[in-house]
Structure formats: C-alpha cells, structure tokens
Amino acid sequence: MVRIAQDVFSVKAAAVNLIDADRQFTKAEAGLDGLVHASRTDSLCARTVEQDAPLIVADAVTEARFAGSAFITGEDPVRFYAGHPLHAPGGEPVGSLCLVDSTPRELDARERRILAEMAGWVERELAAQMEQDRAEQIQQMLMPRTGLSTPTLEAAGRCMPARFIGGDCYDWVVLGDEVQAMVTDVMGKGIPAALLSASARAVLRGTFQYNTAPEAMKRAAGALTPLLEEAGAFITAFLARVDTRTGEMGYIDAGHGLALILSPDGTHRRLASSGPPLGVLAEWTWQVHTTTLLPGQTLLVVSDGFLDFFDDLQAAVSTAATLNTLATTAEELVALCSDYAASAGAEDDTTVLALRRTP
C-alpha cells in the first residue's frame, strides 16, 4: 500500500506510522531507508493523530507546529507533508498514512480523496490483523499454557498453525490419580477448521471427564457428527488416560494413527487404531486399547503436519525416536520436534504432544 501511495502521488516517501504516548512506530515505509521508530516529539504524524483530521502542509519548514522536529531540521528536511489519520476498530486515532517530499507542493481535491480512500484500506487491514491476533490468542488460551509435572508424569505440547489459527488442538487435564490427554486434527486449515476444533475440544473434554471411554466416544460422536456432516469435514482424535501410579493407559485412536511409545534406548512402537475419524461413520463403536507406559517411556502424539517434513512415515517415526534419546524432558522432546515446523515454512498445521513417565 505504501509503495502504491508513493507511486500514485509521485512523492519521495510514504509510510504507515502508529503513535503511542512516547514514540512513532513505522510499520511500513517506502523511501524512508528502513525507518523503524522515532520520538513522538519529532513525529509529524503525531500532529495528525492529535487533531484527528487530515493534515496537509505545503511547506513543513514554515509550519510552526513542526518546529524542532528532526525531520525538519535535518540535512534533508521534509518540505511537503500530507497525513490522513488511521483509526482502530473502536474509532480511536492510532496513526497516520503519510506522504512526504523534499520539495513543497499541494494536494488537489481529487488527490485528497484518493489519500482518504487509501487510508481506509490501511484501517481495514489493521482491523483484520487485530481480529487475527485476537483469534490466535483465544485459540492458544484453549490449550495448556504451561507444561504438566507430577511426581511420576510430565506433559508438554505445542501447536503451530500453518495460518494464524488452525484445526489442530491438544489438551490434558488431571483427574485424581489419572491424566487425560488428547490431540485432535480437523480436516482443513484456517478459521473454519479452528471453529470446528474448538467445538470438538469442548465436547471431547467434557464427555471423557464424566463418562467411560466407550460411552464418551458415543456421546461425542452423537454431538459432533451432525455438525461435521453439514460442514463436510471430519476429525481425527487420539485420547488417552494414564494412571500416574502404575502407568496403565487406556486409549482410543479415532483415525489419527500417529501415536508412539518411545523408549530411552531409541526403540519405539506405534499404537493401534480404534476405528475411523469422527464424522465418517456415525454408528461406529471405537475400541479402547490398553497398554502400560513404563518408567522412562514417552507417549508422543503428533498431527499429520509433522509428516510433511520427511520423505515417508517411517522416516518421521525414526526421527522422533532419535530425538527422544536426546531429550531429557517432555518439554525438550516437544521443542526438538517443533523445530521442524518452525524452520521449514509448514503448509499444514503441526501439533506435538509428549507425555513422559519419569524414571
């Protein structure tokens, strides 16, 4: 947008500046040599924000309100300045879309209308970004913010959406002497998948807290299947409940297929499937499998986005097993696995959950 403004108005520079109590923050610029911030006393855009109206100055050197600004007293002073205020969604003036030039000039009525229209574009982008930031914050709030640590069990997880929010989710909750953990993956990405993911988390968390595993899946499927059918989507899910005293674990794998038991010596085994994803077969009865998490072993569950960083499934599994031999905690294992998604520009949501029984 600032490059277009610079070209349309044939000026030396254009910028989007946001103003706080003390400083000007340049969020985008063309022609200002990478300007990042300036003091509010030097800022020309601060005057635009203060009057909350377009400010057009033909020759800024002669403008009293700009006296003393480093942009005016410097070696290459700003002569022409035009700023249009930018507003937050609540209507508060927060910055300016501005044009500057090294020679005096004016803007005619048509050019002023164009500047106002471009400022409207920027405001809509600021509002959209604010909504995205808030949506991302809320989605992260639905997942554990810190790791879990008990005398015999520790848990850690991380969710990395391909976009600002996504359809993956992980969760855990302590229920007396047991820890209940889950990973879900909604088909698709972005806002639609995130909305379905939030619904699935709420339903699965609630049903599994107050029912046996078979009854919980039956109730969850009954609640989610109509929604998923209407949306044309499905959800893979892995849910486990581990006894913190004995390590005994009951689990259901609903079409997920990416849960492993990793041992400190590098050996590993994949856990069996219980049936299809939620939303595929409404009347399916998912089988509950049982196993034991031995001292030192780790339950690792990833979403299918993790597979994108490897040539095949076996390479992904082998890598996870090797990383486990390097990690001394569940948090370290999650961090090592997450580094793949953080460094490779993932095209799919990637989630990692580790539940380790301490030696």
Image (tube, helix red, strand yellow):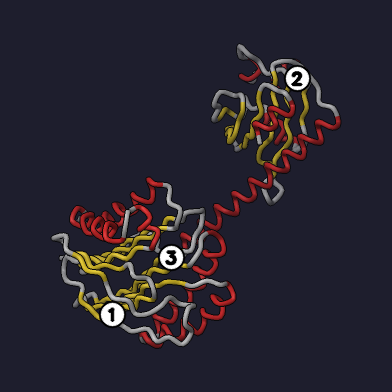
Residue underneath mark 3:
169
| Position of residue 216 measured from the top left corner of the image (x, y, whole percent) | 41, 84
Q: Amino acid at mark 3?
A: Cys
- Pick whichever of labels 1 and 2 is earlier in the sequence: 2
Q: Position of residue 244 (x, y in %)?
A: 23, 74
* Of pointers 3 and 1, the one earlier in the residue sequence: 3
Of residues 84 and 90, the one drawn nearer to the viewer in this rendering: 84
Residue labelled with disc 2: 63
Q: Are marks 3 and 1 in contact (CB under 8 Å)?
A: no
Circles 3, 2 touching at the beta carbon (< 8 Å): no
The residue that mark 1 highlights is 250
Q: Position of residue 243 (x, y in %)?
A: 25, 77
Task: Label 1: state its secondary structure.
Answer: strand
Which residue is at the front of the view, 325 or 82?
Answer: 325
What distance separates the C-alpha of mark 3 from that of mark 1? 20 Å
Quarter where residue 54 is shown: top right
Amino acid type, callout 1: Gly
- At 67% across and 41% down in the image, what residue appears? 122
